Amino acid sequence: MNDIPQPATAAGPSPSATAGTSGPVAAGGGEAVRVEYVTRPGLAGIAVTNFLLNLVTLWFYRFWAKTRVRRHIWSSVHINGEPLEYTGTGKELFFGFLVIMGVIFLPLALIATVLAIQTGPEHPAMTLFQIAVSIGLLTLYGFAIYRARRYRLSRTLWRGIRGALTGSALAYSGKYFASLLLSPMTAGWLRPAMNLLLAEQMYNDMRFGNQPLTFRGRAGPLYAQYAICWFLMAGVIVAIAVGGVALATSDMFTQYADLFGALFKGTGTSSEAQGLLLFVAVLGLAALFLMYQIFSSIIWALYTAREMNLFTQYTTFPGLRFDFSATAWSLVALWLGNLALIIFTLGIAQPFVEQRVIRYFCDRLSVDGLVDLSAVKQSQAQLDERGEGLIDALDLDAF
């Protein structure tokens, strides 16, 4: 729920030539901007054929499947009546994945195999290697996210002008890794400040054509909402813990005390009794976990909505200001709807999940001001031909 992408998405306004209606033009040449999602037919066919081709190819078709979905959804996003265009290819995504597997994961697998043969799988050296690899991969998370955003922006065009991300992926990765370490160390209280720091670099590095986005703001206005959510969650955790203790000491469990002892000592209780005991215990734990997930999603949606709205207001483009109208309940509804689509279609409806997310942002994003389109020229940033293999290999993909 907390990983719903931020609303300042791939493209901003710019000149040049595709069909469609342009926005209102002021006397000085500035143009107002209107963003809308125009639903196109055909996504159901893409979803079904992608699923079948993924099955036949043991999921290797997923790179081309992603490209088909993105082209469809991008072309449904209209700015002043003219659609975005996605120019990435499945071949680029596949090649990027192969490069990452060959450069990072294959050598790590070979080292692990050799180490296990030489020292044995239980040797301390093997444990140290696994810890080092885990930490090393964590340091790559931010790098993967940044490079994936760079690739997608560079393959997003509006009126022939493409986006770009011109900063350092290593700098972003360092900040991201610091946020992963510092947030739990401060019981989460650094999260608003670290999220602001990450958004500041990401959006200040964004370009549409040769024109930059600018992100300026403070984390202070986030903390009142964050404190409310933090203390609500603390109350939920305490309540669930108390409920768990009460459940464990209830008559339902105390009457099975002997069965517990027999189960863990391996003495002779019937398999039926043991099965019933395990079923009740697992059912109780599952109910507590489900309660935690539901309350956590609802409570943190209050903060996430505030952060989305504020970060959008902090973001500007020459002549334009942005506003966003996320609410906690709309985010919960978006999340629940997406979860239902995935569960009840066994994942086949994943393209509709991505469509719902993009449409949510388009419907709630408003743009104020006038932009001078004549000032926007084509980006000169170098195109990355290696796709976004690292984010795919780490299974971090966030549409």
Image: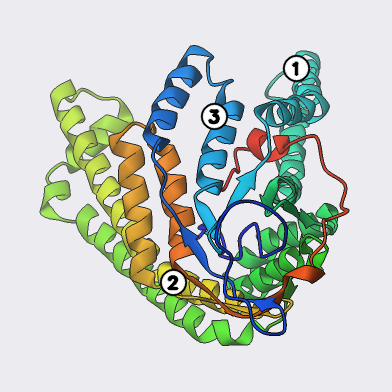
Q: Left or right: where does residue 114 sit relative to residue 196?
A: right
Quadrant for residue 203, please give it: bottom right
Badge 2 density bin: few <14, some 14–19, many ≥20, Cα 10 Å: many
Q: Left or right: where does residue 284 sit relative to residue 229?
A: left
Q: Position of residue 301 (x, y in %)?
A: 42, 68
> In this picture, is 147 found above or below 94?
below
- Tell me the CA gap for discs 3 and 2: 30 Å
The numbered mark, 1 or 2, whose residue comes first in the sequence reads 1
Specify the label residue 65 is tagged with. 3
Depth check, mark 1 against mark 3: the one in front is 3
- Label 2 belongs to which residue? 326
Query: SS for tag 3?
Result: helix
Badge 1 density bin: few <14, some 14–19, many ≥20, Cα 10 Å: some
> In this picture, is 182 found above or below 105?
below
- Tell me the CA gap for discs 1 and 3: 33 Å
The numbered mark, 3 or 2, whose residue comes first in the sequence reads 3
Q: Specify the amino acid type for callout 3.
A: Ala
Residue nearest the observer in this picture, 247 or 293 = 293
> In this picture, is 161 found above or below 237?
above
Q: Position of residue 390 (x, y in %)?
A: 72, 37
- Label 1 belongs to which residue? 113
Q: Left or right: where does residue 250 sit relative to residue 87?
A: left
Q: Where is residue 153 in the image (x, y as percent from the top left)?
A: 70, 51
The numbered mark, 1 or 3, whose residue comes first in the sequence reads 3
Q: Specify the amino acid type for callout 1.
A: Thr
